[in-house]
């Protein structure tokens, strides 16, 4: 039977589209000049339809450029890894790959130091794209020894980009700091055992928070040809490491946590009492025997780590299964008030994407926004109205499917009037399959 990841909201698109002057319902705020980019897997028709899994599709970036109140263009482009370029009959750019890992990053897309960077993990190198989503080639930031990460964190005060990178052939994971100019400012190798998978980490003003959880590399799966050779490992306890931002590997302190898996950090920060607060969407397990077809619900957890007392306390702050957590990028690593998630009983299954939550950490309340059936709403990216506007004074950008048109919309919602009508809906000319993560990338001043 063909994989469910080739059908419905997951179904890949077969064409790369370029469209200009897109129809809009509502009003695009004229101060929004830039691109909303979102990455996700898009099978090319070569994969075995029975065993295909969403996580393994070739990365395709969907982009919408907004300018002076108009939706100037939409483009969707596969990232030209060597195999993607070959499939499309194009010449591959060449460039620095690692460990023979030919991989079109499908997880995330960000801007750093004026470069548009698509991201994956596990040793795969990022790929750089041009402004209009042409592939420039793989990228090692001038000499990274391995791969990078799907979820770097920008320190909003310094502009530095932090990452934790892993690779099954290493006996360590690597903390990487890129400076504002995009150059490697620091790498620290932190020893680990068993080759743990690390999709995300957390950053505070003082610490890099490392998730050494209970999914590790499986040589058996690799020998059997598994494309994702990682599995739940009861023999590998879950623990959380605090690496001081400027410290060496010998300064990491580890704290036990209930065995679990985390794809995504909501945010983390140092509190006034000197504790480290980490909020995550936590799974009780994942990848049982390497299988990706069963995925349990999450809970929203808050971990309070007291370095002085040597303790970690776990609290469930919301037991509704939710994913794609985001906060205002200006409060990453700092105390946040507002956060945004998408609810789904089976977040990577059919029941994804009809409910979005806005959580207020100060009042411990949530607002609920419902979307029409079949919307498949994904991650919301917060964009402030102005650089100095208040934490929820801005817009949420997200892609939804419109079943009536049979195509996708880019929605701009008011973060403050969370349940109110959309500020604008940009009507795209095609479907956008369910995907992962993205960014709003304001245009540089000289590009307007
Ligand atoms: Fe992710």
Image (cartoon, rainbow, N blue to C red):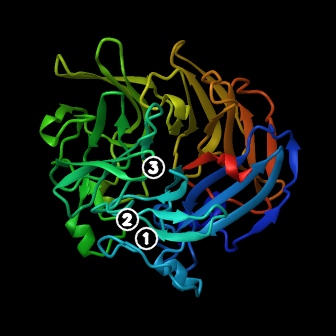
The percent coordinates of residue 273 (x first, y second) are 30, 11
Residue 94 drawn at (x, y percent): 45, 79
Is residue 375 something one can see in this rendering? no
Q: Nearer the viewer, mark 3 or mark 2?
A: 3
Q: Mark 1 or mark 3, which is nearer to you?
A: 3
Whole-number angstrom distance, CA of label 1 to CA of label 2: 6 Å
State the residue at coordinates (48%, 33%). Answer: 156
Query: Where 406 sits versus 198, above or below?
Result: below
Residue, far front: 446
- Residue located beneath label 1 in the image: 103
Q: Mark 2 — residue?
A: 124
- Which of 404 and 332 lies nearest the eye of the viewer? 332
The part of the image, by quadrant, that contains residue 203 is: top left
Task: Kindly identify the residue that appears in the image at 34 percent across and 61 percent down.
Answer: 147
Q: Quadrant of residue 397?
A: top right
Marks 3/2: CA–CA distance? 22 Å
Labelled pair 1, 2 in contact (Cβ < 8 Å):
yes
Give the vertical position of 64 relative to 244 (above or below).
below
**SS at circle 2:** loop
């Amino acid at each position: 039977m063909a994989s469910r990841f080739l059908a419905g909201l997951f179904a890949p698109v077969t064409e790369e589209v370029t469209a200009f002057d897109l129809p809009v319902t509502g009003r695009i705020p004229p101060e929004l000049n830039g691109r909303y980019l979102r990455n996700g897997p898009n099978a090319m028709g070569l994969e075995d339809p029975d065993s295909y899994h969403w996580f393994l599709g070739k990365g395709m970036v969907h982009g919408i450029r907004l300018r002076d109140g108009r939706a100037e263009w939409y483009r969707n482009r596969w990232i030209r890894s060597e195999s993607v370029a070959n499939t499309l009959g194009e010449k591959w750019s060449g460039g620095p790959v690692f460990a023979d890992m030919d991989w079109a990053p499908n997880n995330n897309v960000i801007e750093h130091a004026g470069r548009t960077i698509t991201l994956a993990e596990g040793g795969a190198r990022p790929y750089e794209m041009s402004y209009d989503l042409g592939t420039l080639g793989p990228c090692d930031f001038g000499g990274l020894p391995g791969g990078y990460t799907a979820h770097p964190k920008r320190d909003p005060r310094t502009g530095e980009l932090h990452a934790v990178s892993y690779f099954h052939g290493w006996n360590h994971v690597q903390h990487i700091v890129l400076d504002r100019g995009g150059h490697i400012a620091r790498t620290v190798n932190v020893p680990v055992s068993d080759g743990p998978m690390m999709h995300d980490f957390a950053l505070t003003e003082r610490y890099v928070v490392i998730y050494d959880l209970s999914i590790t590399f499986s040589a058996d799966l690799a020998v059997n040809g598994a494309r994702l050779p990682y599995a739940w490992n009861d023999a590998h306890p879950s623990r959380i490491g605090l690496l001081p931002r400027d410290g060496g590997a010998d300064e990491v302190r580890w704290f036990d946590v209930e065995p679990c898996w985390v794809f995504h950090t909501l945010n983390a920060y140092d509190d006034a009492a000197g504790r480290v607060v980490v909020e995550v969407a936590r799974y009780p397990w994942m990848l049982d025997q390497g299988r990706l077809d069963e995925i349990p619900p999450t809970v929203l957890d808050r971990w309070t780590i007291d370095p002085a007392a040597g303790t970690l306390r776990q609290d469930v702050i919301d037991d509704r299964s939710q994913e794609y957590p985001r906060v205002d990028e200006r409060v990453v690593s700092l105390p946040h008030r507002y956060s945004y998630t998408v609810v789904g009983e089976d977040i990577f299954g059919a029941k994804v994407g009809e409910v979005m939550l806005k959580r207020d950490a100060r009042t411990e309340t949530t607002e609920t926004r419902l979307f029409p059936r079949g919307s498949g709403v994904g991650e919301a990216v917060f964009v402030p109205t102005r650089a100095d506007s208040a934490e929820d004074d801005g817009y949420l950008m997200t892609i939804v499917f419109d079943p009536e048109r049979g195509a996708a919309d880019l929605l701009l919602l008011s973060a403050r009037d969370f349940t109110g009508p959309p500020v604008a809906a940009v009507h795209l000319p095609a479907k956008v399959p369910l995907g992962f993560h993205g960014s709003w990338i304001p245009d540089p001043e000289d590009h307007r």
